[in-house]
Image (tube, rainbow, N blue to C red):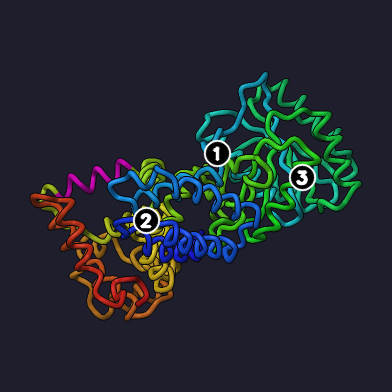
């Protein structure tokens, strides 16, 4: 997300951050380019104007003039104002009410509401340690009810059944009553997708809201709709007392205009960001980290938190002990590393969050086919335990058996073995003095010019 905006802003800001002295003239030129970059990223005009005016007011004042490094101070002002436009600190979910706390989820047709309900349920159960019941009040689409039931089973939360001949208010009230009797903590109510111009449908959701008085009323909006995302959010906000926004398909939106517009136009915070189709692909929205990512400064905090959640600590510790004892890094270890990287969203997701690596992330995205990681895992799985521990025994007939079993070819297998050798050398260096430094140097050596070390190339 934000690739095109990040590129444009980085280019514009480079011209001014290196200046020993800032003048109103060079600030004006940069701000003009910044404004164009925002508008090209599909940021709504009021949001772009508000941002540029705020930066200009601070930049031409004493704040920059008195700084020892005016260019860097200007960049800090841009970052501060980006954070303010996106929304300040994320207040999170307010579930401190008499249980069950009710969350009403609304949005346009096709915005990804039902999937977002499942993602929220998984987050609340896993991160907040609360019991969750989900229910569909979409009486217009039987498939939506079935979809939610399937997703509820996947994320392992309770599902309350409903049918298309019931009234949405009756469904929601029955689900809340059921949750109360079973002492469940949270009820998430999925609603039918509706157009903001559909008066009858908007009346229906207003009645539903009035009858269940939810602790949170979240508006789900597709980031790909750009400026329209902010405009539809405003329409829903006029009809319902929204408490926050869930921005879906953020991983597919290279412009980022919706994220920068929604807060300015609605006054409501973006609380979550959907970053993929999987039920685990939901992130808390941190404005300060997003601002840092837009300006090409990375997002190490999110990367560290993701690593803490998703890396198998026992496997990692076991590998470290093994390498320290001087034992070989075998193909079973290599498979574990591929799985860990996949859990972290792949190499492009990791590079995107590392400072100064956003351009490399884009290059990796063009060169890495994530399916290759699955292919590599399939090849390793087709080997015997003995072959995985000692790949030197692989002769022609063994290789043919492995490639036939994994649906690959000899070139794929040889490429995997070559990459394993490179990783083995890197791990050997890591086991010696100055482990991390040597590991990073080894990683650089494993990536020859032209991206040859990326799988599939």
Q: Quick one: label 3, few (<14), some, or many (20+) residues within 10 Å?
A: many
Q: Of label 3 and label 1, which has the lower sequence position?
A: 1
**In the rendered image of this protein, does residue 127 appear above or below residue 261?**
above
Q: Where is 157 relative to 273, above or below?
A: above
Mark 2 element type:
loop
Position of 49 compared to 413: left or right?
right
Q: Which residue is mark 1?
A: 123
Q: Is residue 29 left or right of residue 440?
A: right
Residue 399 pos. (x, y %): 29, 76
Q: Mark 3 vs mark 2: give the one in front.
A: 2
Residue in the picture at 61% in, 58% down: 43
Instruction: Give the residue displayed 25% in from the left and 65% down from the top.
Output: 387
Taking 436 as reference, is 139 left or right?
right
Instruction: In the rendered view, tell whether residue 408 sits above or below residue 26.
Output: below
Q: Quadrant of the C terminus?
A: bottom left
Determine whether label 1 and label 2 are within 8 Å by CB: no
Q: Is the Cβ of the residue at disc 3 closer than 8 Å to that at disc 1?
A: no
Mark 3 and mark 1: span between their CA atoms? 25 Å
Q: Earlier in the sequence, mark 1 or mark 2?
A: 2
Query: What element does badge 3 sit on?
Result: helix
Res. 412 image quadrant: bottom left
**Residue marked by disc 2:** 22
From the image, tell me which residue sits under label 3. 236
The answer to whether residue 377 of the structure is visible from this angle is no
Magenta stretch: dominant SS?
helix
**Sooner in the amino-acid sequence: mark 3 or mark 2:** 2
- Looking at the picture, tell me which residue is in the foreground, 47 or 375: 47
Which one is in front, 387 or 337? 337
Residue 347 is marked as none
Magenta stretch holds residue 321: yes
* Magenta stretch in the rendered image: 313-323
């Amino acid at each position: 997300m934000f690739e095109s905006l990040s590129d444009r802003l980085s280019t514009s800001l480079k011209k001014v951050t290196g200046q020993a002295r800032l003048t109103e003239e060079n600030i004006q030129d940069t701000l003009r380019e910044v404004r164009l970059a925002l508008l090209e990223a599909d940021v709504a005009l009021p949001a772009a104007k508000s941002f540029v005016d705020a930066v200009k007011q601070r930049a031409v004042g004493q704040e920059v003039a008195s700084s020892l490094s005016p260019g860097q101070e200007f960049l800090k002002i841009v970052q501060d104002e980006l954070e303010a436009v996106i929304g300040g600190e994320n207040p999170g979910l307010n579930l401190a009410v008499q249980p069950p706390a009710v969350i009403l989820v609304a949005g346009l047709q096709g915005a990804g509401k039902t999937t977002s309900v499942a993602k929220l349920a998984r987050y609340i159960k896993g991160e907040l340690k609360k019991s969750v019941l989900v229910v569909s009040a979409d009486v217009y689409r039987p498939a939506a009810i079935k979809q939610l039931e399937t997703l509820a089973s996947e994320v392992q939360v309770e599902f309350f059944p409903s049918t298309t001949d019931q009234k949405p208010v009756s469904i929601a009230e029955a689900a809340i009553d059921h949750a109360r009797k079973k002492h469940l903590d949270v009820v998430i109510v999925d609603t039918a997708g509706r157009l903001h111009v559909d008066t009858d449908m908007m009346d229906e959701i207003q009645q539903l809201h009035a009858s269940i008085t939810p602790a949170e009323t979240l508006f789900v909006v597709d980031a790909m709709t750009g400026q329209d995302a902010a405009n539809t959010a405003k329409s829903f906000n006029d009809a319902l007392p929204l408490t926050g926004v869930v921005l879906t398909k953020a991983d597919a939106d290279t412009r980022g205009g919706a994220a920068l517009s929604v807060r300015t136009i609605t006054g409501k915070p973006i609380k979550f960001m959907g970053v993929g189709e999987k039920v685990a692909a939901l992130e808390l929205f941190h404005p300060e980290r997003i601002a840092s990512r837009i300006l090409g400064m990375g997002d190490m905090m999110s990367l560290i938190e993701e690593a803490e959640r998703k890396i198998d600590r026992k496997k990692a510790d076991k590998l470290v002990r093994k390498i320290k004892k001087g034992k070989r890094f075998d193909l079973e270890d290599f498979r574990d590393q591929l799985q860990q990287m996949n859990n972290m969203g792949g190499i492009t997701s990791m590079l995107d969050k590392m400072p100064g690596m956003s351009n490399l992330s884009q290059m990796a995205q063009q060169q890495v086919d994530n399916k290759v990681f699955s292919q590599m895992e399939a090849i390793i799985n087709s080997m015997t335990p003995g072959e995985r521990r000692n790949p030197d025994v692989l002769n022609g007939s063994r290789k043919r058996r492995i490639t036939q079993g994994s649906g690959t070819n000899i070139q794929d297998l040889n490429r995997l073995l070559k990459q394993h050798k490179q990783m083995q050398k890197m791990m050997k260096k890591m086991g010696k003095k100055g482990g991390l430094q040597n590991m990073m140097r080894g990683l650089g050596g494993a990536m020859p010019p032209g991206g040859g070390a990326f799988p599939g190339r």
